[in-house]
Amino acid sequence: MTITAVKSTTLEEFLLLPETKPASEFINGQIIQKPMPQGEHSQLQIELCENINQLTKPQKIAKAFPELRCVFGGIAIVPDIAVFRWERIPRLPSGRIANRFETYPDWAIETYPDWAIEILSPDQRYKLVLAKLLHCAEYGTEMGWLLDAEDESILVVDRDRRVRELKNSDRLPVITGIDLELTAAEVFSWLSL
């Protein structure tokens, strides 16, 4: 993980910078480049997006977006998965999906995800990733998950910023209106092909 502290950079200036691969985020005045996803990370990200979208997209309940930049509350983050309720997906006047999920003064939609999912990479700092989910909850995100494949646990951050750890056969909570039933063990079973 690369952290670049730039004293004179504002969020607005950061958003004008060219995109990086992997993506960079702007948190507390720092530019932080996310680590390149590895095999386990990619597998969990794909499976979660597919499982969520299979249930929510046909009925237009919600949509899971991988690696989508979300700008709100003075930061710019790129959750591994950002789930937006259907009616909260930013759209252009034409009805087409917006390219940038940012809070604009003339938009009625705040661009925090309804459900933010992070998958811890081996060289990421746990505290920094958890802080992103706590920030999301502070600004309206209903639920956050932090998956740790190493110890097969999932930290759940509720809207009230309560954090709890789930493992094994613990049933995972999801945002209201989505009938996705998973246990922590089922999620991590996706790592075995």
Image (tube, helix red, strand yellow):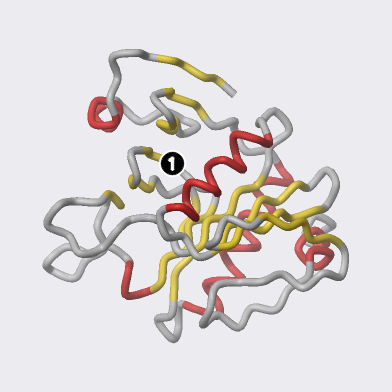
- How crowded is the residue under tag 1: few (<14 C-alpha within 10 Å), some, or many (20+)? many
x then y, percent, for residue 77: 43, 41
List the residue tagged with mark 1.
77
The residue that appears at 87% across and 64% down in the rendered structure is: 168
Q: Quadrant of residue 86?
A: bottom left
The residue that appears at 51% across and 82% down in the rendered structure is: 177
Q: Is residue 180 above or below residue 27?
A: below
Quadrant (top left/top right/bottom left/bottom right) for the N terminus: top right
x then y, percent, for residue 18: 30, 27
- Between 20 and 158, the residue placed more toward the observer is 158
The residue that appears at 61% across and 43% down in the rendered structure is: 130
Taking the image as shown, residue 188 lies to the left or right of residue 136, namely right
Could you say whether the residue bearing mark 1 is in a helix, strand or loop? strand
The amino acid on which the numbered mark 1 sits, given as a three-letter code, is Ile
Taking the image as shown, residue 21 lies to the left or right of residue 45, namely left
Q: Is residue 45 above or below residue 143?
A: above
- Between 106 and 1, the residue placed more toward the observer is 106
Quadrant (top left/top right/bottom left/bottom right) for the C terminus: bottom right
x then y, percent, for residue 30: 43, 23
x then y, percent, for residue 32: 49, 26
